[in-house]
Image (spheres, helix red, strand yellow):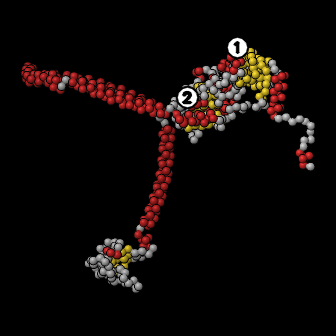
Amino acid sequence: MSEVATESRTNAAEYTVSEISGALKRTVEDTFGNVRVRGEISGYRGPHSSGHAYFSLKDDRARIEAVVWKGTMSRLKFRPEEGMEVIATGKLTTYPGSSKYQIVIDNLEPAGAGALMALLEERKRRLAAEGLFDDHRKQLLPFMPLVIGVVTSPTGAVIRDIIHRIKDRFPLHVLVWPVRVQGETSGAEVAAAVNGFNELPEEGSFRRPDLLIVARGGGSLEDLWGFNDEALIRAVAASHIPVISAVGHETDWTLIDLAADRRAPTPTGAAELAVPVKAELEATLANLGARLRGAVSRMIDRRSQAVRAAARALPTPDQLLALPRRRFDEATSRLGRALTVTTERKRARLSAVRLSPATLSRRIAETRRHLDRDMLRANAALRSLVRERHIRFDRTRARLSPEPLARRQEACRLQVASLERRGALAVGRRLERARTQLSQADRLMATLSHKAVLARGFALVRDADGAVLKRAAEISAGAALSIEFADGTANAVATSGDAKPRPAAKPVSKVKEPGNQGSLF
């Protein structure tokens, strides 16, 4: 019964996967043994290491894989290029290993630029006309950035390569803005990342980067199409932060490469452009420091030699003072004779003058006339000055009024009242702070005072001289003691002790409590 249940209930023939794949391959090759296909080349990366070339032909609705064998590549009249629209002649076949069909091309003819390439060229011309690709808009890269922002996929090998390269050359802080680097939304996400980095504050935990790297691995024209987005190009051109474009391989190009401040052939090359090599900088600084020290030493030596040479050329103090000293000596020798001659001349002139009362009267009268004339002039000048001062006083009095003085007095009065109130408040606050400090000092003194210890049941023992006794070994038998308690002081005599007895200052009463045999009392 079970054997009947497991038998097939249909008469259809069974095929293996290989049989179906082989049948489809023969059917496709027999039906499309020689076809001409018009399409746009996509994903072309040149011949493989084997010499074969693999790419795709596409239009606006479909895509077909294509292969050109090594022998056919050598016979082609032109080399295929990415985005070129061609007419391919060949046959269709299938690849059983992946259940795909492809065209094996025997001949290629150019048919013009593809749709995507035409759109790209038109967009490139329009944005270039706006000046977004001009060299004068491009910014210089910082020589030693502190923070680098990277816009790329967080899961790809690109970010690991960039971080690893930066870490090897010059470790610094890297901010990663995760985006999708392929698909319809990739362009908008990258543009938002560039604008977001530019809106970060210049200071803070997440400060604005000093340099941006927009990176992605290689791919076909369709894969990299997001980096031709017009919004992204405008965001990169308007960025206040210098941007390095590292999209695709060295043979790939997108519009962001033209708008960016620098283009790197690979993401690793972008990291090398972004930061210098720390070890080389340290070596350069050490070399420059050594050269500077040597230059300073040589300069000091040259200046010292110049000073010594100049000192040898300078005259000695005796040589400098020789001529002035000689002139001084000659003037000294002439001075005595000149005084004698001058005295004789003055004496001769004085003896030649004849003095008489009439001469003196004339001189006095002449002097009086001069004084009278000067007095008249002084009186006239004084009257003129008084008139002028009266006129100026009248003008000034006319301009003056009591209102400004009253306003000034009222302002001063208000200022004095304000100062009095502030002074009273300041004195009150000062007194309050003093009271608080005094209270705190009193509490601290009470805390640190030995009175608090005595209040807890302890006692302070002093000898007859008033010295504090800290050990029993310091007490001798018969010594006079003074014991201070919290509420007063009591005198006592030691009945036993290890120290030698000392003479007491005065006799004291003996105090001995019952039950304290062998104690100090």
Q: Is residue 120 visible?
A: no
Number of disc labels = 2
Residue 133 picture location, percent across and down: 63, 21
Disc 2: which residue: 273
Quadrant of res 199: top right
Residue 350 picture location, percent across and down: 9, 22
Q: Which mark is residue 282?
A: none
Mark 1, Cα crowd under 10 Å, few <14 / some 14-19 / many 20+, is few
Residue 464 picture location, percent across and down: 30, 76
Lateral position of residue 351 relative to residue 197, left or right: left
Q: Give SS at disc 2.
A: helix
Amino acid type, residue under disc 2 in the picture:
Leu
Lateral position of residue 341 relative to residue 193, left or right: left
- Quarter placement of the C terminus: bottom left
Estimate the spatial distance between the alpha carbons at disc 2 and disc 1, rounded to whole Å.
Answer: 39 Å
Tell me which residue sits at (65%, 25%) in the image.
49
Disc 1: which residue: 77
Residue closest to the eye, 76 or 337? 76
Tell me which residue sits at (41%, 30%) in the image.
287
Q: Give SS at disc 1.
A: loop
Quadrant of res 486: bottom left
